[in-house]
Amino acid sequence: MIFDKGINLVAGLLIGVWVARYLGVTQYGQFNYAMAYVSLFSPIAMLGLNDLVVRNLVRNPTHGNDILGTAFVLQIISSLLAFGAPVVIAGVIFPDDTLFKDLIFIFALGFLMQPISNVLSYWFESQLQSKHSVLARNWALIIVSIAKIGLILWGASLVNFAWANTLQTMIFTLIIYHLYTKTRKSIKAWKFNGEQARLLLKDSWPLIISGLAVMIYMRIDQIMLSNMIGPDENGIYSAAVRLSELWYFLPVALGASLFPAIVRTREMRSEKTYNERMQLFFDVMTLSSYIIVIPLTIFAPLLIQILYGPAYAGSGGILRIHVWAFLFVSLGVSRSRWLIAENMTGISMISTILGAVVNIGINYLLIPKYTGAGAAWATFVSYAVSAYLTSLFFVSTRPVFKQQSLSLLSPLRGISIIRMIHKVVLLNEYIKGKDQ
C-alpha cells in the first residue's frame, strides 16, 4: 500500500502543483474553498462504517454477505443525504454566487458514487487485500492526471478541473468493482439485514459525530480564511496544506494493514502481547511521522519556491507549522483503531468534538492577525488536544496516553523498538510453523 501510494504520490503532487500554478492564487483558493465546504459533509456519506464493517467482517466472516449488503444500503441513503445537503445549503446562503454553486454541485456528485466503492474497499481491507483498493485508486489517479494535463494545455476553466475530481471517483468505483468480480464474488449475494443495520448504527453514531468534528477542524480553517481574509490567502494556505496532508496516507495505510491483525491479537493472544503490539503500533506510526516532519520543516520555504513559484512564497512559513500536526494525526489514527477494538467510540466522539471547538476558537482569535500562519497553529493545537491530550482525561485511556507519550520519544528509543519488532517477527514465525 505504502509503495504504490508513494509512487502515485509523486505523480499526484506534480500535477497538483501544475494545476495550482495554472489556476493562480485566487482561483486555487476558490477551488479549495468549495472542496473544503463539500468535505464537511463527507462523514455523513461515510456514516462512520469503515472500521466497524472491517471489524465485523474479521470477527464474523460467515455473515459477510449480510454485513456487506447492510452497509451498502446504509451508504446509499447516507450518500443521498450528503449530496443534497451542501447543494441546498449553498443555494440558500449564496444565491447569487453561480460559480460557487456550480463547484459545490460537481464536487458533491462524488458522494453518489461512493456506496459501492466504499463497501468493496471494506471487504478488501478485511481480507488484508488492500492492494486491490490501492491499485484502483492509482489507476484512477493516473487517468485523471493525464486528463488534467490536457485541461491545462487546452486552457480549461476552473469548473472543468472540478469535473476531473468527480471523474476520478467514478473511475475508481468502476475499477474496484471489476477487481471484486475477478475474485468470483458478486454483489448480488449481498443481503440487507435489519439486525445488522441496528448493530452498525448503534456503534457508528459516535463515529459519525466524530467524523463531522474531524472534518470541521481539518477544513474549517480554509473556510474561515476565505470568509475572513479572502480567496488569495486561502490559495496560499491551501498550497501548504496540500504538501502537509500529502503524507496522511502513511498512518492510514499502516492502520488499515495492521488493524485486522491487532483485532485478532486481542481475540486470540494474551493481554501482554496485545499491549506490546499496540505500543509497537504507536512507535512505528510516530517514527514514520518524524521521518516526514523534520525534513519538511527544514526545507519548507525552498520546496515551496521550487514547486509553486514566487506567487506562493508565503506558503513556506505556514508549511513549517502545519506539518507538525502530522505527528498527532498519526497518534490519532492509532488511537482510533484502539478505541474501536475496545468498543470505546464514545471517547473518540468527545475528543474530536473538543478538537473542533478548540480549532474554531483559535482560528477566530489568530486568523485576523496572523492569517494563514494563525490557521496552521490552530490546526496543530487542535490535533494535539484531540488525538493526544484527551487520552489523559479518561481513566480507560490513560494507559494509551502513556503509550502515546512513549511513542513521542521513539527517536530516542530506537534500539528497544527494533528489539520489539524482532520479537514480534520471531513470534509470528513460531506460531506459523506450529500451525503447519
Image (spheres, helix red, strand yellow):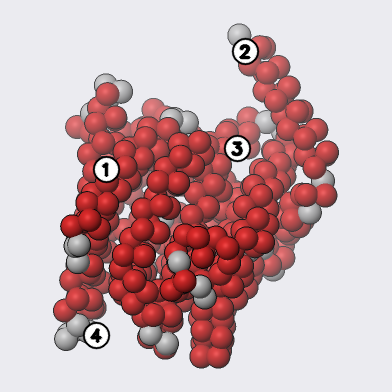
Which residue is the site of mark 3? 262
The answer to whether mark 3 and mark 4 are in CB contact below 8 A is no
Residue 35 x, y percent position in the rendering: 33, 67
Q: Amino acid at mark 4?
A: Ile
> Looking at numbered disc 3 in the image, what kind of residue is underneath it?
Ile
Residue at the (58%, 63%) spot, across then down: 302
Residue 267 seen by the camera: no
Dot label at residue 93: 4
Label 3 environment density (alpha carbons within 10 Å; few <14, some 14–19, many ≥20): many
> 282 or 337, which is in the foreground?
282
Does label 3 or label 4 sit earlier along the sequence? 4
> Mark 2 or 1, which is nearer the eye?
1
Which comes sooner in the sequence, label 2 or label 3? 3
Which residue sits at x=27%, y=43%?
A: 143
Q: Which mark is residue 143?
A: 1
Closest to the camera, between mark 4 and mark 2, is: 4
